[in-house]
Image (tube, grey):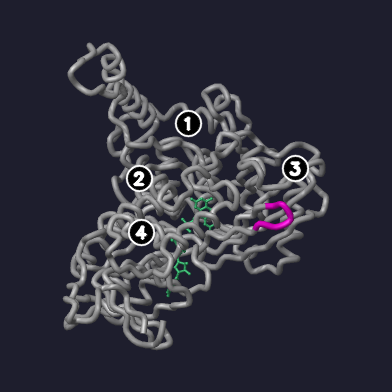
Amino acid sequence: MGTQLSSVDIAVIGAGPAGLTAASAVVERDPLASVLVLETASRPGGHAVTTVADGYTFEHGPASIRSLTPEVLAMLERVGLGDRIEEAAASGANAAVWRRGRLHPVPTGLVSAATTGMLSARGKARILAEPVLGRKGPGADETVDEFVRRRFGREAARVLVGAIVQGITGGDARSTGLEAFAPGLWQLDQVAGSGSLAITALRQRRAQRRAAEPAQRVAPAQPVQPVQPVQPVQPVQPAQPARSGPITVRRGGLNAMIDALAAYLGHRLVRGFDACSVTPISTDPAGCRFEITDGTGRRVRTRTVVLAVPARVAARLLASKAPQLAAVLDTIGYTDMRVLGLGYPTKAFRTAPPSFGFLSPPGEGLDIMGVSVSSGVFEGQAPPGRTLLRVFAGGAFSPGMVDASTEAALARAARDLRRVLTVSARPEFVRDVVLRQAIPQYGRRHAETVRQLDRLLLELPGLRLTGNSYRGVGLKDTISEAERLGRSLAGAGRQARPGPAGGEDHHARHQ
Ligand SMILES: Cc1cc2nc3c(=O)[nH]c(=O)nc-3n(C[C@H](O)[C@H](O)[C@H](O)COP(=O)(O)OP(=O)(O)OC[C@H]3O[C@@H](n4cnc5c(N)ncnc54)[C@H](O)[C@@H]3O)c2cc1C
């Protein structure tokens, strides 16, 4: 790309999983659309980076997609990975929580919940007393911690839910907004009102089961209608049902997904384009509504611009021409993370680690916030006889672990691993990744912030936001939303295509 003007139907800024997915969905549905994906780095993928070395497959950032939604499946099939989907061998049910100097398996049923040593007798009694003691909430702007304390008590909030929020976002449940972090739970709480959350959940589940039953019972009994084509007997389902456990891509991990998306987009992916401003324009003959510039004077004009960058970057791009939108975007904060990849001979562990890993609730005396056992979750991520750990540190509770040198961070992690996972050998595989401003933090008012952004976007037709800053921090939500956005943009307005005399088609011109 030279220093002059390109002109396209759709420009996506940011080639992380969101931007790549949205662009690929447009291209599949509307192959004639001119689409460019502008990425500042030399490689696409954002936080999705995989190192494959010495027989280990180490994911620097995301390691799995929490479940296979129809949208995720559609994207993987589009890029030719439908037959390489690998389901996890372990799930959250195989995880443990570090509490009072011991690992406790995550309770998976009533009996294990009643007998777990993870919570005190009082803490467990308070959970069970939810139908009596649970109270109605304020309806909006409540944090996850406040919600759990109101319904299930203080200990459940700190130990169970504090660990989960920290494990997913690196953040603090006391400042994480319930509606944005767990919209399903927030809705359930609204329905339950002053009644019991647990009983409302049971009723809803029963009602859903009943709603599904008649179709299942009646369909097989329907008389055969010889003159009609055979009707399917199952209740209506998406073309491919979503699978519920975590997934990755066999052979290559999430890098393989990024590479396949990049290959699918081909020349439409422009690397090394560090966007520095997005300016609304009104006088373009081809009907473009925005001009994007980078630091070297390159310009791209487009009818639709999709900002698939973190909200703080979107704020910077829009600061001078859409200051109100930029100011709201800038309220979304981020936390830093450190991920250590450590590979050991399996026999170095005196006791086998929980196959999914463990979480450490804030305040339990560890420098690390948890460990994922990569080789337990997905087969083949470590050589035979070896165990690969991903050790997470930093976040809201131990920022010092991000600033520490590699040696210091490794030493502190080694101390915790000796204590929790009974491993004192030196790892034979070591990788250290520091990720600044890695994960967006959905604050108390995040859901309202997103609604405010939606309202402000109405004033800038053609400008769209996607990515994990808004409606879900993980890949499942990020990819699903980007896929739906891409589909909705396909065919939503092309540049006028001049006749042969015009000498130009509407595809991106790289001058
Ligand atoms: C340590 C860690 C572990 C995680 N683990 C999981 C997990 O196991 N499962 C899961 O589902 N999720 C996980 N996540 C979350 C997951 O990484 C995100 O959901 C996902 O990366 C978000 O994708 P995105 O496209 O929105 O943003 P990003 O991945 O941040 O991509 C944004 C892209 O925009 C580019 N960009 C930025 N500025 C500019 C600019 N000015 N011009 C052009 N391009 C620009 C960036 O280079 C980048 O490529 C984890 C995250 C971290 C940090």
Vertical position of residue 168 compared to residue 89: above or below: below
Q: CB atoms at circles 3 and 1 under 8 Å apart? A: no
Q: Circle 4 sits on which residue?
A: 22
Residue visible at 34% across and 83% down in the picture:
299
Q: Nearer the viewer, residue 266 or 437?
A: 266
Q: Quadrant of the C terminus?
A: bottom left
Q: Which of pointers 2 and 4 lies earlier in the amino acid sequence?
A: 4
Where 404 sits versus 291, above or below? above
From which residue to which does the magenta span run?
A: 52-56
Pointer 2: residues within 10 angstroms few (<14), some, or many (20+)?
some
What kind of secondary structure does the magenta stretch mostly adopt?
strand
| Direction from residue 57 to residue 496 in the image, left or right | left
Q: Amino acid at mark 3?
A: Pro
Please state the horizontal and vertical placement of residue 103, each as a whole percent of the image. Answer: 67, 38
Label 1 neighbour load within 10 Å: few <14, some 14-19, many 20+: many
Expressed as whole percent of the image width and height from the top left, the position of residue 29 reads: 29, 55
Asked whether the viewer can see residue 243, the reply is yes
Q: Earlier in the sequence, mark 4 or mark 3?
A: 4
Label 3 to label 1, Cα distance in Å? 42 Å
- The residue where tag 3 is placed is 384
**Disc number lying in front (2 or 4):** 4
Mark carried by residue 127? 1
Q: Residues within 10 Å of mark 4 (few under 14, many from 20)?
A: many
